Amino acid sequence: MEFFKALNDDHRAFIAKQPVFFVATAAEGTRVNLSPKGLDCFRVLGPNRVAYLDLGGSGNETQAHLSADGRITIMFCAFDNPALILRLYGTGSYVVAGELGYDAFAAHFPRLAGARQVFDIAVDSVQTSCGWGVPHMTVERPRDTLVKFHAQQAPADRLAKIATRDRSIDGLPVRVQTVMPDFDPLPPR
């Protein structure tokens, strides 16, 4: 195990290769939330700053936890060679679609249906470890089900559903989006 004060070029290259990452957050008195993330939604913005585009899903625990506590851990792990696990420890904030600053952040990412916010993370430390216990796996293909689901929904229907999700599973408040960002149609297969 080794700690670094900032991301270096090797870390950036490793992150760019990974098809999935994991996000962990918690707040006092709540469950720990751990979410897998895919798609082309993660960006290194600087040696101590990263961001990811968040699409609507089953809940919004990350936003609720960051509002209450601020701590966040991002983990990447190699499923090929060389074996490696990389964790980013930091504090996070978010900008909901339609709010001031969202468009500037969103410009770093593909325009995906269902985008609801961008998480901005100040990285305090970077940790690497061996990853020797992680199995070898290959990616068969990206899963575009979530984006397709959002693309087929009428914006008014989606916003009405989102408006009812103003609390986390533990009752913390969640700031919901009130506009749907433009998105690019899915490229043909």
Image: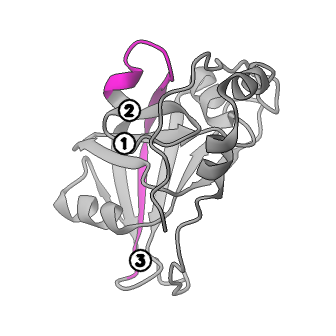
Q: Secondary structure at mark 1?
A: loop
Q: Mark 3 touching mark 1, by CB under 8 A?
A: no
Instruction: State which quarter of the image contains the N terminus.
Output: bottom left
Q: Is 120 situated above or below 123?
A: above
Query: Residue 29: image x %, image y %?
Result: 77, 30
Q: Mark 1 touching mark 2, by CB under 8 A?
A: yes
Q: Does the magenta run of residues contain 97?
A: yes
As measured in the structure, the alpha-carbon distance from the residue carrying label 2 to the one carrying label 3 is 33 Å
Give the residues drawn in magenta, as a range.
83-104
Tag in front: 2 or 3: 2
- Badge 2 density bin: few <14, some 14–19, many ≥20, Cα 10 Å: many
Q: Secondary structure at mark 2?
A: helix
Q: Which residue, given by chain and number where applicable, does mark 3 sit on?
A: 130
Q: Which residue, given by chain and number where applicable, does mark 2 sit on?
A: 106
Q: Mark 2 touching mark 3, by CB under 8 A?
A: no
Q: Is 54 situated above or below 18?
A: above
Q: Residue at x 25, y 64 (%)?
A: 13
Query: Residue 88: image x %, image y %?
Result: 41, 50
Res 104 quadrant in image: top left
Query: Residue 106: image x %, image y %?
Result: 38, 32
Task: Name the mark on residue 109.
Answer: 1
Who is closer to the viewer here, 56 or 85? 56
Query: Residue 176: image x %, image y %?
Result: 65, 20
Tag in front: 3 or 1: 1
Task: Name the mark on residue 75.
Answer: none
Q: Amino acid at mark 1?
A: Phe
Q: Amino acid at mark 3?
A: Cys
Q: Residue at x 59, y 21 (%)?
A: 67
